[in-house]
Amino acid sequence: GENVEQHPSTLSVQEGDSAVIKCTYSDSASNYFPWYKQELGKRPQLIIDIRSNVGEKKDQRIAVTLNKTAKHFSLHITETQPEDSAVYFCAVFWGGGADGLTFGKGTHLIIQP
Amino acid sequence: SQTIHQWPATLVQPVGSPLSLECTVEGTSNPNLYWYRQAAGRGLQLLFYSVGIGQISSEVPQNLSASRPQDRQFILSSKKLLLSDSGFYLCAWSSGRGSSYNSPLHFGNGTRLTVT
């Protein structure tokens, strides 16, 4: 099956600085890579996703980059704000039996005022 | 638009008691349905998924089971709960196999289960 590694587990940045979270995966057949944001006690919500035929995607302050050769993808948040504090999960869809997403273990992003 | 309903929001059950969590989706047909579990401060673990009525695939062997009696209804059950079953249970849906591309998961609000 697919194996997803996410780093770091905790990330603390000053408000206004940028944050980068990285995930690696093992199955080269994986073709869909979403990112979810989960605030305390709430459900994960999709914030951005990228498919394997695209190298980069941006939505306002959030961007995702994908390197298929190296099998890693990253979430970039610029000009961080207090409301960006949450746990972020990367996920990989590989469709090789488990018809669902394999999630990374999550990154707790803390925005320091 | 599509919506997903999951209940109850919280549940406290004694060890050895049965469990039934229900999830329904509105506004879409033939969705893929999923049950995930999240232990406190941990990641998301896929428990079951279903691509159609009566079709259930289990990812993790345990004392839980799932059923899909209707197209947009997904139920998570247990005959006898264990302490280790405590956690945050999330139902989710995605577009079914008729889609031409992989689609994202949309989660319900979750059920926080505490087994005492």
Image (cartoon, rainbow, N blue to C red):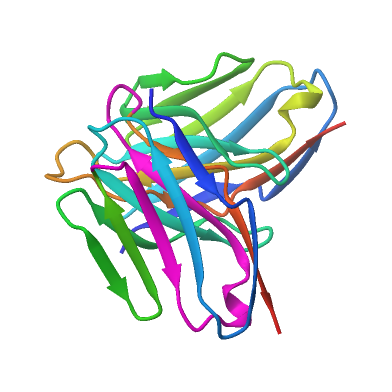
Task: Answer yes or no: is residue B107 visible.
Answer: no
Q: Does residue B43 show up magenta in the picture?
A: no
Looking at this view, name the residue that lies furthest to the front.
Answer: A70
Residue displayed at 59% across by 52% down: A8
Residue displayed at 53% across by 19% down: B60
Which residue is at the front of the view, A79 or B23?
A79
Image quarter hosting the C terminus of chain A: bottom right
Task: Answer yes or no: is residue B83 visible.
Answer: yes
* In this picture, residue B39 sits left or right of residue A46: right
The quadrant where residue A40 appears: bottom right
The quadrant where residue A26 appears: top left
Looking at this view, name the residue that lies furthest to the left.
Answer: B100
Q: Which region is colored magenta?
A: A69-98
Residue A50, x across and y down, in percent: 27, 56
Residue B44, x across and y down, in percent: 55, 40
Q: As displayed, is residue A66 above or below residue A24?
A: below
Q: How many marks?
A: 0
Image quarter hosting the N terminus of chain A: top left
Residue A41, x across and y down, in percent: 68, 58
Which residue is at the front of the view, A57 or B32?
A57
The quadrant where residue B85 appears: top right
Residue displayed at 11% across by 44% down: B100
Residue displayed at 25% across by 39% down: B30
Residue A89, x across and y down, in percent: 51, 52
